[in-house]
Amino acid sequence: MIEVIVSDRLGKKTKVKCLEDDTVGDLKKVLSVQIGSLPSKLVLQKGGTVLKDHITLGDYEIHSGTNLELYYV
């Protein structure tokens, strides 16, 4: 189990617990429940790279404590 920190542009940080085998789409679903938004309206970035929904967190080298940027579409 890992804990990823997701920050939006307003400075709000949300901690999300998930597995490294989960896809980015799975992370968006859990995050959407926590922040009250639709997963299809969320865009996650790591270091300026937009994360695609079908790729696992482990493939993007996202580990516990990793910071991701959250943008709304």
Image: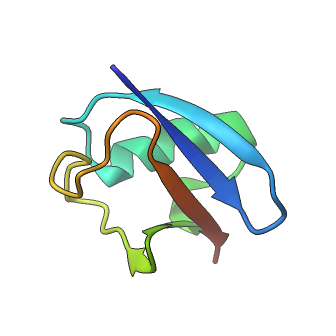
Q: Residue furthest right?
A: 10
Residue drawn 57% across the image and 64% down it: 69
Residue 47 lies, with reference to residue 11, above or below; the image says: below
In the picture, the quarter occupied by the C terminus is bottom right
* Residue at 39% over, 33% down: 64
Q: How many labels sit on residues?
A: 0
Quarter holding residue 58: top left
List x then y, in percent, for residue 70: 61, 63
Task: Return the x and y of residue 51 as percentages of the image width and height.
Answer: 35, 68
Give percent across and percent down for residue 48: 45, 80
Describe residue 64's horizontal placement relative to residue 54 as left or right.
Answer: right
Residue 20 placement (x, y as % from top left): 24, 35
**For residue 73, side relative to residue 47 (left or right):** right
In the image shown, does 54 or 68 lie closer to the viewer?
68
**Colour treatment of the image:** rainbow
Q: Is residue 66 above or below residue 49?
A: above
Q: Residue at x 80, y 50 (%)?
A: 12
Q: Quadrant of the N terminus?
A: top left
Residue 67 drawn above or below residue 51: above
Residue at 38%, 78% in the rendered image: 49
